[in-house]
Image (spheres, grey):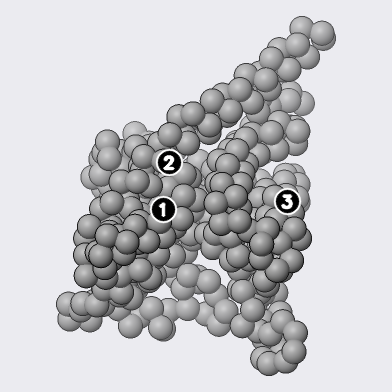
Amino acid sequence: MRRSKLTERTPRVPGFDGLRGIACLAVFAVHFQQHVRLSAAFGPFELPRLLENGNTGVALFFALSGFLLGLPLWECIHSHRDFPPLRAYWAKRLARVVPAYFICLTALIVLNRHWENPDPWRDIVLHYTFLFNYRQASIFSINPPFWTLAVEVQFYLLLPLFFLLVRKMQPTAGGICLLAFAMTSYLVHWLVMDSWPVAGDGMTRESPVLHYSVLAHLPHFLLGSAAGVLYLSLRKRVYAPSLQVVSDLIFWLCGGLVLMTLATPLDDVLELPYGRYNWPFVPAMLTAMIVFAPFSLLARALLESFALRMLGMISYGVYIYHLPLQNATGRYMKALALNPVEHWMLFGMVSLILTAIVAALSYSLVELPLQRLVRRSISLRRHNATMST
């Protein structure tokens, strides 16, 4: 059996940069709303509810991550090739996540003199090892959005294990199996939450350690991974005349339903107990948008627009830097006698521009060069191995 070439770059999927751009804007909106507390309603549509539900951007990020990481593995299963080597898989994953995160983390520790807080060193070590989401005092201690990175890295550990379980199956059966794993992980999380003490001296059911665990979000990742099977099936029919029309209809219908759910009282109804981000309804619609966006016409044109594409390319930096920069913008505005609540538009524009600048610098000077270096290193190692045989 021929070994697959992990070092070959996965072809860029049209529309995905735009989806990342939308996801990071949604998360930016959550913390923007926490600063300015806008209040407006248009019939059943509530602006505060919509902005607060911008955290659904995290669900979109997780589903995209599961989809993109699973796609090359589905291709290996489909073509009966070996899975990529884990060493290269981890090198590429860590090169994607670690450098900018460590820079931001270190800067915040130094600027905020974090070592002066109670029990700082355990907190700092847990952050550098992506384990801080298992300690209640640490999960939001340095930069609240960081919790998703811990969950993401922990999912990197689990993904190869799930695919090892389905590697001998036909892709369709394997996709159904991953969906079953997704529902099973939700049920296990539900049982954990339902049996956990409501009150007590230690960690209770309301603890963020339980709500922001990898178990609580595993269904979102696996839903995205399972969707890769449907995507590969549709890719064979890319020239079918009706595919663009159907894809646009599904994309815009799902997008409208997501918007309606997040902005209206449906938000209080469409969610199973202890499900995250209106699970399973909104995550399923987001996953459908991921699958059909590349085959659509109008949706892909929007997602491939220059602004959304550029924002999507720097979305990781936008995500990790936006809250510290929002906090800094708020402090400086108050120092200039400008209340962010009263001048919410100025606050939003300045903090977003600053975030985009810092994220673009991080992408150009840190993230992209290191990812290219890792890819070249893997490619060179593969070449040397080929020559030696």
Q: Is residue 328 left or right of residue 71?
A: left
Residue 253, position as x, y percentages in the image: 29, 61
| Image quarter (top left, top right, bottom left or bottom right) of the N terminus | top right
Instruction: Identify the residue under disc 1.
Output: 325
In the rendered image, is residue 46 in sight?
A: yes
Mark 1 nearby-residue class (10 Å; few <14, some 14–19, many ≥20): some
Label 3: state its secondary structure. Answer: loop
Q: Quadrant of residue 91?
A: top right
Residue type pointed to by label 3: Thr
Instruction: Identify the residue under disc 3.
Output: 129
Residue 130, position as x, y percentages in the image: 69, 53
Q: What residue is drawn where x is 17% and y is 81%? A: 43
The tag on residue 359 is 2
Q: What residue is drawn where x is 66% and y is 65%? A: 117
Total marks shown come to 3
Mark 3 nearby-residue class (10 Å; few <14, some 14–19, many ≥20): few
Residue 310, position as x, y percentages in the image: 34, 37
